[in-house]
Amino acid sequence: MNAEAMSGYNYAYLDEQTKGMIRRAILKAVAIPGYQVPFGSREMPLPYGWGTGGIQITAGIIGPDDVLKVIDQGADDTTNAVSIRSFFASTAQVATTTVTQEATVIQTRHRIPETPLKSGQILVYQVPIPEPLRFMEPSEAETRTMHALEEYGVMHVRLYEDIAVHGRIATSYDYPVKVEDRYIMCPSPIPKFDNPKMDDCPALQLFGAGREKRIYAIPPHTRVKSLDFEDHPFEIQSWEEACAICGSRQSFLDEIITDDQGGRMFVCSDSDYCARCVREQEGK
Amino acid sequence: MYVAVKGGEKAIAAAHRLLARERRGDESVPEISLEQIRRQLSLSVDRVMSEGSLYDPHLAALAVKQARGDLMEAIFLLRAYRTTLPRFGYALSVDTSRMHIRRRISATFKDVPGGQVLGPTFDYTHRLLDWGLAGSQERESQTNAPAPEEIEAVDATHDFMPRVLDVLGREGIIESETCETDPEPDDLTREPLTLPAGRSMRLQNLARADEGFLLAMGYSTQRGFGNSHPFVGEVRMGEVEIEFVPEELGFPVTIGEITLTECETVNQFIGSGDARFTRGYGLTFGQGERKAMSMALVDRSLRAGELGEEMRGPAQDGEFVLYHSDNVEASGFVQHLKLPHYVDFQSELALVRGLRKDAAGKEEDHER
């Protein structure tokens, strides 16, 4: 995107009225953790389903002093992350970084960085389907009522059925959580490996679903509990392998197919974390 | 050994250059102009304006050109531009009975005040490829052009043409749809869809909806999934004036003229002693008869609940229709599946491998 194409647009693309509307929705979302706030989602110059919710939140909160990091699948260099980062670099003239600790705003798709977040940072999630009950109840009118009445029986039944059929809960990503003991919430399609990072997180977590026109939030230091049963406690994925680049055994690993003979290797999905581990080892 | 997926930035830039080259195509063929698109592919332009919900033939032509003729992509381009425009206010409701008619037909009466006007329509053409258009068609089009008196005849007679349904309305035999006031309509592009949606929000949604989707939905009602027994009371197409009341003036001024296609259907009656027909309504920018008719069918079928009809088809389900009608939303979400899903897939892989391992372990135990 060149400067000429973006001239004539407001700072961070959206007009100030729209940003105000988004900020009001965010405030409401922060006041009611885990509750999905409907908002007047706008058509963005990027397609629905490609992060328009996250982009609108970022556009609503970003300022010239911010430092923006954008990741997709944990990495800064995946094509859509590159595209969103360059969108804000040109529309908001904002500094960008790939380093988790340096960022004030981190927009993410499908991962929470391995490096622990700190107070003052904002993590903006891109959300495809914000409704945790959607695949049990397709009607939006119905699911909103179920949330209002805290009628979450179907969710527990679904998890129980998994255990009855598979011997374990067969959800590996977008694993439902309960926020501050009230609302059941979609954490967006992050691997359940990342779920524990949401609990008592010092950073503000904001969730934007553009196509579905919903914003929700987890304020700093909020209780976020992954749903489970006493006799089937929640557990996260683990790997027998270590990262082939940095050797980490603590991070979420992506599998890379190396040949057509079944050869494969595992590397960190969080490219910034992986690079930091390598630097630290070289420093030693 | 490990080839990381680096260099996304360079790859994107290269892809954009390739796209630009493909868009232009063979440079020995002259570049197509926006005027050519606007004048000769006018139905493409009309569709893009309708579903893009922005009446600007020039920008719609630009979008069609930039999108290489992909109309959904063009609609998306126009929508993304439209959201950035400031709002000055609402125009007065257009009065389609004052439409400068170019086409007007009724299927309910053999003759109606103002008569039947076929106008420029594909109806009754034999769909035979016209080889004359393949070569130099200038001569052809000149011989086929309407005689000046034909154009004049239409111009002179049809400046005021009462709507067929208004004629029925005077008899009280069809439900009335007049509104004493002119309230501000709902606006989907500023407020999220809430359910159950009011009629103005439904109609706005349908006006922006994908033509193919509406066609299929309307068609499904005709095949038994919620029939509403429609008759086409009227289809009309032509130009209407847009009037606006600037605050500082306090009286309406004409700010322009747009082309519209309107369809009103006469449907399944309600009551018995006081039996009255019901209505469906469809409206598009430009010439968009197929869509206007489909829209009228779907508008009517979405009233099933309000009219106490049995719900038997998806076209009667407001949530189903209104949430899935928008092609910009649908196209984005379907195509987002192209984005990387390494992390989610890795999670599923681990899960499936785990399940298989559990099962293999159990079998061994069993054999022992």
Image (cartoon, coloured by chain):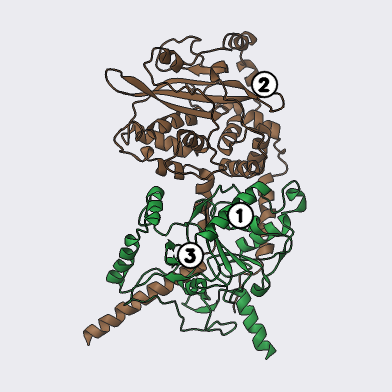
Q: Is residue B176 left or right of residue B274?
A: right
Kindly report which numbered mark, 3 or 2, lies closer to the viewer in this rendering: 2
Q: Which residue is mark 3?
A: A187
Residue B294: % across, % down: 44, 31
Same subunit, tags 3 and 1 = yes
- Give the drawing colour for chain B: brown
- Res. A23 mark: 1
Q: Looking at numbered disc 1 in the image, what kind of residue is underneath it?
A: Arg
Of labels 3 and 1, earlier in sequence is 1
* Residue found 39% across the figure and 35% down from its top: B302
Element class at badge 2: loop
- Give the drawing colour for chain A: green
Using the image as rendered, state which of residue A74 and residue A244 is in the foreground.
A74
Q: Name above or below for residue B290 compared with residue B11.
A: above
Residue A245: % across, % down: 59, 82
Using the image as rendered, state which of residue A65 and residue B107 is in the foreground.
A65
Q: How packed is label 3: few (under 14 Cα within 10 Å), some, or many (20 or more)?
A: many
Element class at badge 1: helix
Tell me the distance, in whole angstroms, between the alpha carbons under discs 3 and 2: 53 Å
Q: Is residue A216 left or right of residue B279?
A: right
Identity of the residue furthest to the front in this view: A31
Residue A124: quarter of image: bottom right
Kindly report which numbered mark, 3 or 1, lies closer to the viewer in this rendering: 1
Q: How packed is label 1: few (under 14 Cα within 10 Å), some, or many (20 or more)?
A: some
* Residue found 49% across the figure and 52% down from its top: B334
Q: Which residue is mark 2?
A: B251
Q: Mark 1 — on which chain does it sit?
A: A
Element class at badge 3: loop
Q: Is residue B190 left or right of residue A101?
A: left
Using the image as rendered, state which of residue A174 and residue A177 is in the foreground.
A177
